[in-house]
Amino acid sequence: MALIVVALGVTSCSRQAAGENPITLPAPSSTSQAPSTTTTSEGTVPQAASPVEPVLEVVGDNFQQPIWVGARPSDGVVLVGEQTGLIRELETASVVLDLSGKVLPGSERGLLGIAFLETRMFVNYTDENGDTVIAEYPDRDASADQERILVRIDQPASNHNGGGIEIGPDGLLWVGMGDGGRSDDVFRNGQDPTSVLGAMLRFDVSTPGLAVAAGGYSGGLQEIWAIGLRNPWRFTFDDGLLIVADVGQNRIEEVSIVASTETDLNFGWPLLEGSDCFDSCETDGLVLPALEYDHGEGCSITGGVVYRGSAIPDLVGSYLYSDYCAGWIRAAQLGPDGTLTDDRELFAGVGRVTSFGRDAMGEVLITDHGGSVFRLGARSNS
């Protein structure tokens, strides 16, 4: 396993070819451990804090287009989802589930997301027709013929299939759907509460093999919780907040944060791209981004997770995210009111980042589409 030292601090955005090792940057100055003490004749005297270097450790390699990583709740084993349809154990690379015969991979299609509820595993993939399938399997010793299809959604184009799928704090299955693809919301789904495309969906999956619409958007389909999304590739929950990273079109990438208990939300696409005018300049009643950046800094946001690990105390409460094109990883401090502040770059040149996840200890894992899996950790300089 390779150990790659990278730094907290602001650097220019850069992109590195897939398969190359991320570059080494100077050690950070802002991250530290708790100070040690020394006992003298005058009593206990605090010593200077021992600095900690954030590092990315390569903990897996040679995966085929990894797009998801996380711990299986029933036993803590870390799994990696490959876009081509395989779900593997990180440590052994052994196959947990082979969906390659069901999945149509390529570009924005394939196996796209995984979620767990107790000993049940839910997957989001595009089938051989290019349509979205949400299916259920046992979380281990599963085979493709044990599939229970819960939801099937027709897709009019090959792109903007979303991919994010999570169990929310309400115990419901949340699914982020793109607007149907092509460009400019050509299918006019973004502002249509009667279309499941361009929307955040919710399902009650408390009964195995069954998904009951549980969204409750007023005047819309019962599975819709919110509208106005373009392509929410990744979203996450933290302390009752929903954090959605929505991929922009030509100019703006954005992160929006709302309470997961709110209702009738509209994230704005295609009226707005980020906070800028697109079809309209009217912002009344729309959720505006908590964070955005333009295409001078990247081209396709990869939403992440809020850091709640113990390896890097200075990062606790920071939302970690990346950009597929630029290859950096950034952190922004999450406030209890859903604001993001102190946005800064942690790492440059990591690769084509596709997802963030957590191991059983809550430490962050990251996938690079080129084949690697990283663990975020720390190394003391003392």
Image: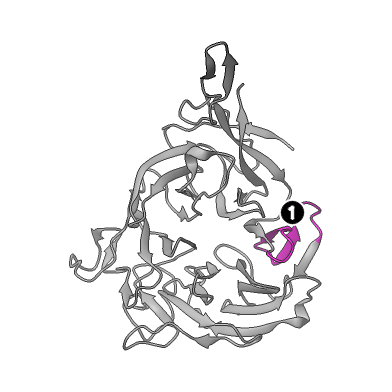
Residue ID at (50%, 54%):
304
Residue 240, image quadrant: bottom left
Residue 191 vertical placement versus 367 (above, below): below
Residue segment shown in magenta: 73-94
| Residue 6 relative to residue 266: left or right | right
Indicate the position of residue 145 as horizontal and vertical percent values: 77, 82
Name the quarter where the N terminus is drawn: top right
Residue ID at (29%, 66%):
287
Residue ID at (64%, 62%):
83
**Which of these two is toward me, 98 or 137?**
137
Q: Amino acid at mark 1?
A: Leu
**Which of these two is toward me, 29 or 337?**
337
> Is residue 278 in the magenta section?
no
Indicate the position of residue 138 as horizontal and vertical percent values: 73, 76
Indicate the position of residue 22 as horizontal and vertical percent values: 59, 35
Name the quarter where the C terminus is drawn: top right
Indicate the position of residue 94 as horizontal and vertical percent values: 81, 59
Q: List the residue tagged with mark 1.
A: 90
Label 1: how many residues lie within 10 Å, few (<14), some (14-19) or many (20+)?
A: many
> Is residue 85 in the magenta section?
yes
Q: Secondary structure at mark 1?
A: loop
Residue 332 vertical placement versus 139 (above, below): above
Res 220 visible: yes
